[in-house]
Image (spheres, grey):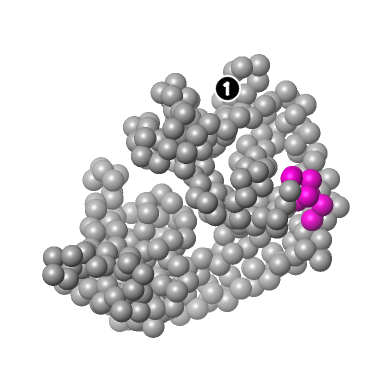
Amino acid sequence: MQRELGWLPLHLGIYQSEQLVAACAGYLTSHSFGDFVYDWQWANIAARHDIDWYPKWVIEVPYSPVTGARLHTGGHIQQLTGVLIQAITQIAEQQQFACVQINYCRPEEAQLLDQAGFIMRPDTQLHWRNNQYRNFNDFLNDLTSKRRKEVRRERNKVAAADIQHIWISGQDADDELIRFVHHCYQKTFCEYGNYPALNQAFLQHICRQLGDQVQFCIAGRNGSRLASAIFLRSPSHLYGRYWGSIEEIDCLHFETCFYQGIEFCIKHGIQVFEPGAGGGHKLNRGFLPQTIYTAHWIQDPVLKHTLSQLSSEECRYDLRQQAHIQQHSPFSQSKSS
């Protein structure tokens, strides 16, 4: 990431006999944009303690609220993870960082970080899961009657506007398509007063490097492109990223970002669809709560105590929210999980 965007690479590697045995990818950040942790309240509390929250050391994939391995140990989790965690805290102490954040870590990593004295901060995302569906109607049949009718009504609105969708992989995307996708992404960010950090060269780069792991869903009418959504895929997961449109069409966002993604998962046997952070509107469209974890090392003991108490309150609130969400599940009672 460019220094101008406030992300300065600070990666960590541990070597044994000149062989890399453990590593983590991290960045010094001068703000909290793009890490999706929303810790501005914590930063304000630090300021009241006369502590500079920034720069903070963030260990994650920038602009990607996706759970994954953060402490890479070549599979030797028990043997090397403790060494890596100790190295992280030693460097943070030496450099006098107020905070280290290890974001969207795996549950097994979260457990080890908790044992090492990190503050665990849970959050909730909404994910869709493939219940061995044969087609979209199979999925609809798992929903309550009310939600099933709402989804059909939304899809029918898009169809009535004569909108068609096609999927194009990164390896098949030409420069004209990438320009259009980036324009849609940029337009949406600017309309909401946000800064579009990902440039067109980045999209070209991931298309070259990742090939068909990058997927673009393009909406159009009579051969003209109207909207796009960016996805990344693995054999087991589909990840929805950014979208945008050049024409306002009712329910087009739901179709392009959610329903097309669900159909893609069913067609390709993908088990989990993660459409990104936030968005309570996803619940009614078949996405259910999933707990995700961030871990926080705090240098100052007084600040650590204060934030630990706050985190406990946030955890209780998160559990209540999940229980509330489950009570309003869009799935019929026999299918809710």
> Residue, x 20% and y 68% (percent of image)?
14
> Residue, x 47% and y 56% (percent of image)?
66
Q: Quarter-wise, where is residue 287 in the image? A: bottom right
Answer above or below: position of 47 versus 236.
below
Q: Main secondary structure of the magenta part?
A: helix
Answer above or below: position of 268 versus 199.
below
Give the residue at mark 1. 225
Q: Position of residue 177 (x, y in %)?
A: 47, 25
Q: Position of residue 335 (x, y in %)?
A: 77, 63
Task: For residue 192, say whether it is visible.
Answer: no
Magenta span covers which residues?
Answer: 135-142
Q: Which residue appears farthest toward the left when viewing the image? A: 17
Q: Amino acid at mark 1?
A: Arg
Q: Position of residue 179 (x, y in %)?
A: 43, 25
Counting every numbered tag in the picture gives: 1
Q: Quadrant of the C terminus?
A: bottom right
Q: Which residue appears farthest toward the right when viewing the image? A: 145
Count residues near mark 1 (Cα–Cα under 10 Å), then give few for <14, some for 14-19, many for 20+. some
> Residue, x 69% and y 26% (percent of image)?
163
Q: Secondary structure at mark 1?
A: strand
Q: Is 282 inside the magenta-drawn segment?
A: no
Q: Is 136 inside the magenta-drawn segment?
A: yes
Answer above or below: position of 268 versus 122.
above
> Residue, x 40% and y 63% (percent of image)?
69
Task: For residue 227, say whether it is visible.
Answer: yes
Q: Quarter-wise, where is residue 37 in the image? A: bottom left
Q: Position of residue 76 (x, y in %)?
A: 34, 73
